Amino acid sequence: MKTVSLGASRPSTVYFRMPTRDNLVPIRVDVEVDGQRYRDAFTWNPRDPDSEIISFAKRTAKDLKLPANFVPQMLQSIQGQLAEFRSYEGQEMQIKEKIVPLKIDLRVNNTVIRDQFLWDIGNLDSDPEEFARTLCDDLNITDPEVGPAIAVSIREQLYEIASQSVSVMREKQMSKKGRRAPEFSSNSKAVNNAVDLFKYFGSKGSVIRKRKEWYLYEPVVDVVASEEDGKEEVNNSSRPKKRAEEEKVASLQSL
């Protein structure tokens, strides 16, 4: 799997995008109308025309037998999130050779999964969807909705890091005429905990579990009874919405 070259110590400046192979937007919809609630999470290609959103909302309402007044609210939610993503496009972001800790804490139907791992945000060939499928296979998770939920959670965290990096670049550019800006500042815990990839781990993959810290990074999966209370992150993630060709299998390195 290709990685960003670690030979140079200087950060690379690129235009805003998801730090993954596919530039897909994580979308989370939570709409309630007249006592009925629709929740879903999925990814969307920001290059798709808005007519695709309309078709998707109408088709979803029909498939789930939701009232027609759900459609405008679904449209508003999806279009708003896409508009925010597009507002960052064309702006510079700064990606260093760093890894960041990501955490998964989800309940999907009767499956509860908790995990944490280190992700190389400098590897623009990384694939959260393939990683999620591999993780589910390794853990013998058979619920088809769990993998998409994991992938969306990963993309949401990477999206936060990418958008924060745009804000950092803005601050640095504004400070050139005056005081020196901090090298990196962010409210994102994941970003603030980043460490230099080359110094600590080399260039062997995009997902890393350090051998001596396996006890910290071991995934936990529980199956709970349907009547138990718990947070349910995704209700309809089993419908694939990723609009891209299948990619190479994501690398999961144990160092």
Image: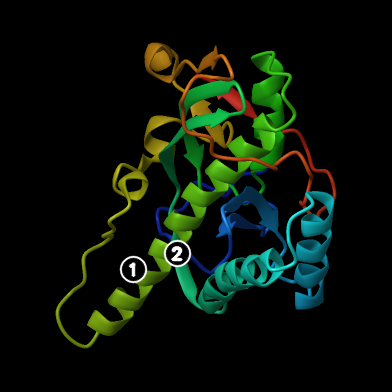
Judging depth in this view, the residue of 146 and 16 nearest the camera is 146
Q: Position of residue 185 (x, y in %)?
A: 26, 60
Image position of 23 (left or right of 229)? right
Q: Residue furthest front?
A: 34
Tell us which disc is closer to us: 1 or 2.
Answer: 2
Residue type for callout 1 = Val
Q: Residue at x 44, y 56 (%)?
A: 160
Query: How was this image coloured?
Result: rainbow
**Can residue 230 be seen from the camera position used here?**
yes
Place residue 171 in its image quadrant: bottom left
> Between 48 and 77, which is closer to the camera in this rendering?
77
Say if 209 sits above or below 89 in the image: above
Residue drawn at (21%, 65%), measured in percent from left and top? 182
Residue located beneath label 2 in the image: 163
63 vs 176, nearest the viewer: 63
Question: What residue is at 73 percent from the left and 61 percent from the top?
Answer: 67
Secondary structure type for disc 1: helix
Q: Which residue is mark 1?
A: 168
Element at badge 2?
A: helix
Give the vertical position of 118 relative to 124 (above or below). above
Quarter of the image that includes the N terminus: top right
Residue at image point 41% right, 41% down: 100
Q: Give percent across and percent down for residue 173.
A: 32, 80
The quadrant in which residue 48 appears is bottom right
Q: Earlier in the sequence, mark 1 or mark 2?
A: 2
Task: Answer with the quarter of the image where residue 240 lies.
Answer: top right
Residue 243 position in % (x across, y down): 80, 56
**Amino acid under label 2?**
Ser
Give the Cα separation between the discs numbered 1 and 2.
9 Å
Q: Residue furthest left?
A: 179
